Amino acid sequence: MIKINEIYLSVQGESSHTGLPCVFIRLTGCNLRCSWCDTAYAFHEGKNMSIDEILGKVSGFGVSLVEITGGEPLMQDSVYPLMEKLIEKGHRVMLETGGSISLERVPKEVIKIMDLKCPGSGEQEKNHLENLKLLSPDDEVKFVILDRKDYEWSRDLIKKHKINETAHILLSPVFEKLDLKDLVKWMLEDRLPVRLQTQLHKIIWDKNTIGV
Ligand code: SF4
């Protein structure tokens, strides 16, 4: 069984796949407590579902792209057979993870979107930097930026580990905390090889709406 917070159809609001129809499977529970977290409702609430029940619900939407998210989806061991079954069924599977748990057991077909937590999150110490060696060219590393200090920390880490040579890099400002214009200015000044990310779903719907 897997504890599931919600399963719903929407458009991808983040990542390089922004705008594509996607089924989201949100797993309950998280081992982190980021200062700016917008999904705290997924820390505890949810119901247990079997993998077959989840697959049945997902197939009912008739959409190929599926994102497994949380919370921290890698906290529940059954997430691995779930990812394998979704791939077997022909789905394109994306995994959104906070970056504190090893990616070693994630099937190679899965597109990994891994956060690296900046100082402003309060969870910087939890980054499992060994994961950088497990990324493929289709994978994405996301930095959520609260302020200039977070930006500089991200920039220096990107350069130190040459992250752009192994994966796409997304810089995403904390919603309503950092002005997009400031982040764009800094990125361009430094000619940083990254992609700006907005949270499309918060533009389409109210920022507090869940299940969209
Ligand atoms: S990892 Fe994600 S779900 Fe967990 S506290 Fe941070 S932002 Fe929230």
Image (cartoon, helix red, strand yellow):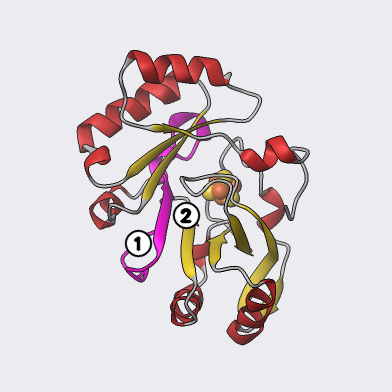
Pinpoint residue 31: horizontal percent, then vertical percent: 53, 55
Q: Name which quarter of the figure residue 112 lies in.
A: bottom left
Label 2: element kind = strand
Q: Above or below — where is 57 with respect to 8? A: below
Q: Is residue 100 left or right of residue 39?
A: left
In the rendered image, the vertical position of residue 59 relative to residue 143, given as above or below: below
Res 71 quadrant in image: bottom right
Residue that badge 2 annotates: 97
Judging depth in this view, the residue of 170 and 89 nearest the camera is 89
165 displayed left or right of 146: left
Q: Is the residue marked 2 within 8 Å of ligand 1, measured from its CB?
A: no
Q: Name the residue under label 1.
A: 103
The location of residue 14, given as percent across then percent down, is 55, 44
Q: Does the residue labelled 1 lie within 8 Å of ligand 1?
A: no
In the rendered image, residue 43, in percent from the top left (x then y), is placed at 66, 56
Say which quarter of the image contains residue 118.
Answer: top left
Is residue 184 in the magenta section? no
Mark 2, other Cα within 10 Å: few <14 / some 14–19 / many ≥20: many
Cα separation between marks 1 and 2: 9 Å
Direction from residue 158 to residue 26 in the image, left or right: right
Residue 92 higher or lower than 81, as above or below: above
Tell me residue 23's x, y (percent). Answer: 62, 63
Q: Are marks 1 and 2 in contact (CB under 8 Å)?
A: yes
**Residue 102 covered by magenta stretch:** yes
Q: Is residue 111 above or below residue 186?
A: below
Would you say the magenta stretch is mainly helix, strand or loop? loop
Q: Can residue 33 be seen in this view?
A: no
Classify mark 1: helix, strand or loop.
loop
Instruction: Write the start and end of the magenta stretch as one range.
Output: 99-126
